[in-house]
Image: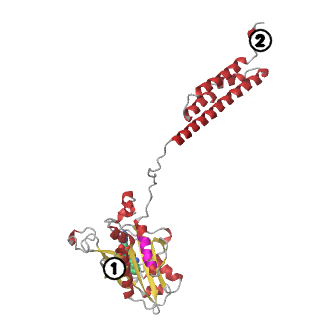
């Protein structure tokens, strides 16, 4: 009998598996990235990899030959997997050593993360809140979606009142509206408790408006003070204190007789136009901001109408009060010299970064 016949069945497969493991071992030494190593691993151990063919043949061997070949297959797989693990670890270590070996210049400036800023309208609201907190006012808020009664009827503005036209707003389902001013917070506050009352109420309001000085959504701030024998002189003193604290003592302010259904008497509060300084810097006809008047309206004010007190169950014989509502974006516009209110809502980082 020749030696060929004495070779055990499966010996060729065992030799092939060992050869593949050795071949992989030689190949991996030259690979320098995890991606290449994983690709090589797949070329050997993947579904269509180099070990797939001998593995298929293993199934066709007689039962007595299978254990030895199976063992060789496991040996080859394990050898390939440990070579992968060892090579990846070696790469990691080399990378770490390179990092540690690098000279660090501790004098280099740090890599700062760009910081955001508070929105100018937030800055203005906070500053104004501080001024009124200093005068003993409390800060209250109310919902943006209001009942018509709180927004109009209780403020002495019944459904057929022409003043409703000036505050055309958006109706939502259920007969509610997007509040057209912060004045309903007056009603909510007085319904919630007896006088005295001394509050401010900042928040967004909505109207069917859209131009350089009118946006469809804008922040207002209401003020309400109710006590015994409150006079118009106190309203004027409070407003002048507020405007001068906010803009500086030099800014011109004027109260102009006006009309609101919920105050009597009523006034419009105007501040001198920053662009033309009340018409002094450019001829009044050319100022695009105040349209030549020299003044910009920042709010309305007046003495609380007796019908408003009646609506909330206060006795108009026993108490009096003043109220005002200012447009916070108009205040911001004047303070920072912004000539279009819409800039506050465009979220242009170059614009916002100026308010750091
Ligand atoms: C009112 O809204 C009254 N509720 C104010 C008030 C309160 C009067 C309490 C008396 C007592 P008016 O509609 O004038 O009033 O608005 C007040 C301010 O909001 C205006 O002076 C203006 O500064 C600002 N404003 C009005 N409409 C807009 C708008 N579309 N965009 C930006 N600001 C606006």
Query: Dominant secondary structure of the magenta stretch?
Result: helix
Magenta stretch encompasses residue 132: yes
Image coords of residue 149 (percent x, y): 47, 78
* Disc 1, SS: strand
Which label was assigned to residue 91?
none
Q: Which residue is mark 1?
A: 268
Left or right position of 19 against 185 = right
Image coords of residue 323 (percent x, y): 41, 82
Which sits in the foreground, 9 or 79? 79
Q: Quadrant of residue 16?
A: top right
Which residue is farthest bottom?
Answer: 317
Task: Please say whether residue 49 is visible from this viewpoint.
Answer: no
Q: Quadrant of residue 340?
A: bottom left
Count neighbours of disc 1 (C-alpha within 10 A) and say few if under 14, some if 14 to 19, many if 20 or more: many
State yes or no: Cβ of the residue under disc 1 lies below 8 Å from any atom of ligand 1.
Answer: yes
Q: Which residue is mark 2?
A: 6
């Amino acid at each position: 009998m020749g030696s060929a016949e004495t070779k055990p069945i499966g010996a060729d497969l065992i030799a092939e598996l060992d050869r593949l493991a050795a071949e992989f071992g030689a190949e991996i030494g030259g690979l320098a990235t995890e991606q290449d190593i994983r690709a090589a691993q797949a070329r050997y151990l993947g579904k269509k990899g180099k070990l797939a063919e001998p593995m298929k043949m293993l199934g066709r061997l007689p039962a007595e030959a299978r254990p030895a070949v199976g063992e060789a297959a496991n040996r080859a797989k394990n050898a390939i997997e440990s070579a992968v693990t060892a090579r990846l670890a070696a790469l990691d270590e080399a990378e770490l050593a390179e990092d540690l070996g690098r000279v660090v210049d501790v004098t280099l400036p740090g890599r700062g993360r760009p910081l955001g800023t508070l929105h100018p309208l937030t800055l203005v609201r906070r500053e104004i809140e501080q001024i009124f907190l200093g005068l003993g006012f409390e800060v209250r808020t109310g919902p943006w979606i209001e009942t018509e009664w709180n927004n109009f009827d209780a403020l002495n503005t019944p459904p057929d009142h022409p003043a409703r036209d000036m505050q055309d707003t958006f109706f939502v389902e259920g007969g509610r509206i997007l509040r057209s001013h912060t004045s309903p917070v007056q009603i909510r506050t007085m319904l919630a408790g007896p006088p005295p009352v001394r509050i401010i109420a900042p928040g967004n309001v909505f109207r069917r408006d859209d131009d350089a000085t009118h946006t469809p959504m804008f922040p207002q701030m209401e003020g309400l003070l109710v006590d015994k024998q409150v006079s118009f002189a106190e309203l004027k003193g409070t407003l002048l204190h507020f405007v001068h604290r906010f803009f500086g003592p030099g800014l011109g302010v004027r109260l102009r007789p006006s009309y609101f259904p919920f105050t009597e008497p009523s006034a419009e509060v105007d501040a001198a136009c920053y662009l033309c300084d009340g018409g002094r810097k450019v001829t009044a006809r050319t100022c695009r901001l105040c349209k030549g008047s020299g003044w910009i309206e920042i709010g309305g004010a007046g003495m609380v109408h007796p019908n408003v007190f009646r609506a909330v169950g206060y006795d108009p014989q026993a108490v009096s009060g003043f109220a005002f509502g200012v447009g916070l974006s108009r205040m911001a516009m004047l303070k920072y010299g912004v000539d279009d209110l819409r800039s506050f809502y465009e979220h242009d980082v170059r614009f916002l970064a100026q308010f750091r």
